[in-house]
Image: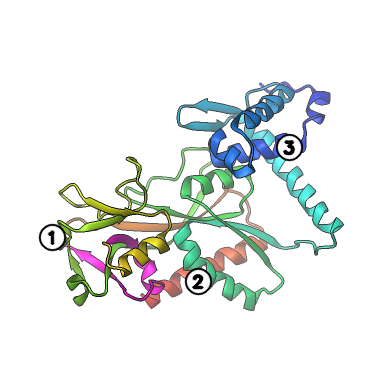
Amino acid sequence: MLCVNVMDFRDVSLTSLRVFRAVAEQGTFTAAAAELGYTQSAVSRQIASIERAAGAELLERRRDGARVTTAGRIVLQRATTVLDEIDAAARELTGLPARAGTVRVGWFPIAGAVLGPRALTALRRSDPALTVVTREAGTPALVRALRAGSLDLAVLALAPPFRPPDAESPALVLRTLTERSLCVAVPAADPLARGSFVDVADLRGRRWIAGSATAGDGLMGVWPGLDEKPEIAHTARDWLSKLHLVAAGCGLTTVPAVLATVAPAGVRVLPVRGGPREQRRVLLARLPQPLPEAAARVAAALHRAALDTDVAL
């Protein structure tokens, strides 16, 4: 049961509310500190302060990060409302126009490179008064931001076996925007680029450009079905950096089929045949509550952009 001393909770600072929301969205104290430009100890002090005021544990500290408790979800919902109102007041005081009809959308990086711009271009024509504020993050961070109430919609990426992106309740409303096979990006000058597909057997013994140098993420960018230890020649976090390394002849990397439309010169994005199919699914996620009209228009624009992209491919 949440027992709150009302006078104590009224003394909670805006800084504490912002820090609490950042930890809830980022999932760890360390990531929240990096986002806000604080030290980790400063973040811990702010969280301790707001928990004392609430008279309850708002975050469950776990080995893999911090999870919002039932009491924390109550505080988080109210904190998001308060912070949004404060930000709106600050805009009005500085003479900036009010953000009527604002929709907050998050997407993973590749969606922001293809689906996002297509949807925003269409919305500028159909709904010029609509303001769409976007942010880019990985799928886990986007899900936390949805739960925190700081996003209205999120475009997520899922790989098989396509489990729900989190186990929280109530379950998120998920709509599949597109599902296509994973592809391989190869240098245009490579013999593999001469055909219309790559045979999985031809991927053995190749050099790869992976997404990270860490042990946990080292195989991102490497074809999942390889039956050998891959040679990772280069690592890069950004997909565009990986594709430019491919164009320079530095190796191969895996990419969703959707990137075929925006790959730089010197790169061919090809499907892979042989072995199990490697599917990737793009989902539009939201909380299970009535969707405001403005957000519904943005969701429809993202769906149309996904359909247009599929046709283009």
Q: Quadrant of the N terminus?
A: top right
Q: How many tags in the picture? A: 3
- Residue 180 can be seen, yes or no: no
Disc with the residue nearer the chain's start (1 vs 3)? 3
Residue type, label 1: Ala
The residue beneath circle 2 is 304
Q: Is residue 92 magenta?
A: no
Q: Disc 2 or disc 1, which is closer to the eye?
A: 1
Label ID, residue 15: 3
Dot 2 lies on which element? helix
The residue beneath circle 1 is 201
Dot 1 lies on which element? helix
Q: Nearer the viewer, residue 264 or 196?
A: 264
The answer to the question of whether label 3 and label 2 lie on touching residues, with beta carbons closer than 8 A, is: no
Disc with the residue nearer the chain's start (2 vs 1)? 1
Q: Above or below — where is 242 with respect to 230?
A: below
Dot 3 lies on which element? helix
Farthest-out residue, left: 201
Taking the image as shown, residue 30 lies to the left or right of residue 181, namely right
* Displayed quadrant of residue 265: bottom left
Disc with the residue nearer the chain's start (3 vs 2)? 3
Residue type, label 2: Arg
Q: Quadrant of the C terminus?
A: bottom left
Which region of the structure is painted magenta?
252-274
- Residue 181 can be seen, yes or no: yes
Q: Spatial distance from mark 2 to mark 1, Cα to Cα?
A: 36 Å
Q: Nearer the viewer, residue 226 or 2?
A: 226
At 26% from the left and 56% from the top, the residue drawn is: 208
Residue 222: image location, x then y, percent: 27, 54
* Displayed quadrant of residue 190: bottom left
